[in-house]
């Protein structure tokens, strides 16, 4: 297994064009991580909502009317039957039938997994943001120095 070594770079010794390129690269990484976090949180909320709605499937609700979603904005009236079993979309066109308790457990495992993924990405994103801020600070400082030099030469 190869060992990855991190090397600190003195940003004050890096050219402005390199700093600008580095800043752009880090901003893209921060944007990617931010988008990924947003998507993971959205999926986590969907799994949590699915788990929560399963509490409404109790034997007392057998035969009660409900609105059945055909799409995200189209519903048809229906009646609940077999409130002790559900059909779950487990991805890529596969479905499985399971008990309500097993479905709750399935959704909780998904939520827990996503929480771990989110917790793993957040420190990386914070570190990237900190690095971006340092690069930006050095870049601004160099710009001010260059502006001062140009003003000094024109006087």
Image (cartoon, rainbow, N blue to C red):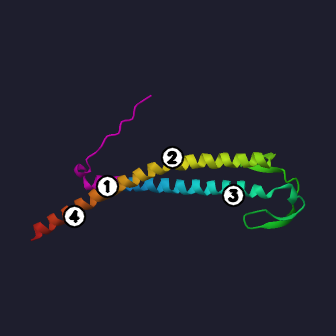
- Secondary structure beneath dot 2 equals helix
N-term-proximal mark, 1 vs 3: 3
- The furthest residue to the top: 1
State left or right for residue 113 relative to residue 80: left
Front tag of 1 and 3: 3
Image mark count? 4
Q: Quadrant of residue 62?
A: bottom right
Whole-angstrom CA distance, mark 1 to mark 3, is 41 Å
Mark 4 = which residue? Answer: 144
Region in magenta: 1-22
Across and down, in percent, residue 130 comes to 37, 54
Mark 1 = which residue? Answer: 135
The residue shown at (53%, 53%) is 36
- Secondary structure beneath dot 3 equals helix
Across and down, in percent, residue 15 comes to 25, 52
Across and down, in percent, residue 97 comes to 81, 46
Q: Residues within 10 Å of mark 4 (few under 14, many from 20)?
A: few
Whole-angstrom CA distance, mark 3 to mark 4, is 52 Å
In the displayed structure, would residue 76 be above or below residue 31? below
Q: Residue 120's mark?
A: 2
């Amino acid at each position: 297994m190869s060992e990855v070594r991190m090397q600190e770079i003195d940003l004050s010794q890096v050219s402005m064009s390199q700093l600008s390129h580095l800043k752009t690269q880090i901003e893209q990484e921060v944007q990617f991580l931010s988008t990924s976090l947003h998507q993971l949180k959205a999926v986590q909320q969907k799994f949590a909502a699915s788990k929560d709605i399963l509490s409404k499937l109790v034997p007392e609700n057998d035969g009660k009317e409900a609105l059945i979603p055909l799409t995200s904005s189209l519903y048809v009236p229906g009646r609940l039957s077999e409130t002790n079993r559900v059909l779950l979309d487990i991805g890529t066109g596969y479905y499985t039938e399971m008990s309500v308790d097993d479905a709750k457990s399935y959704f909780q495992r998904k939520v827990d997994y996503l929480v771990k993924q989110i917790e793993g990405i957040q420190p990386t994103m914070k570190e990237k943001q900190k690095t971006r801020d340092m690069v930006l600070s050095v870049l601004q400082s160099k710009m001010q120095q260059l502006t001062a030099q140009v003003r000094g030469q024109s006087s």
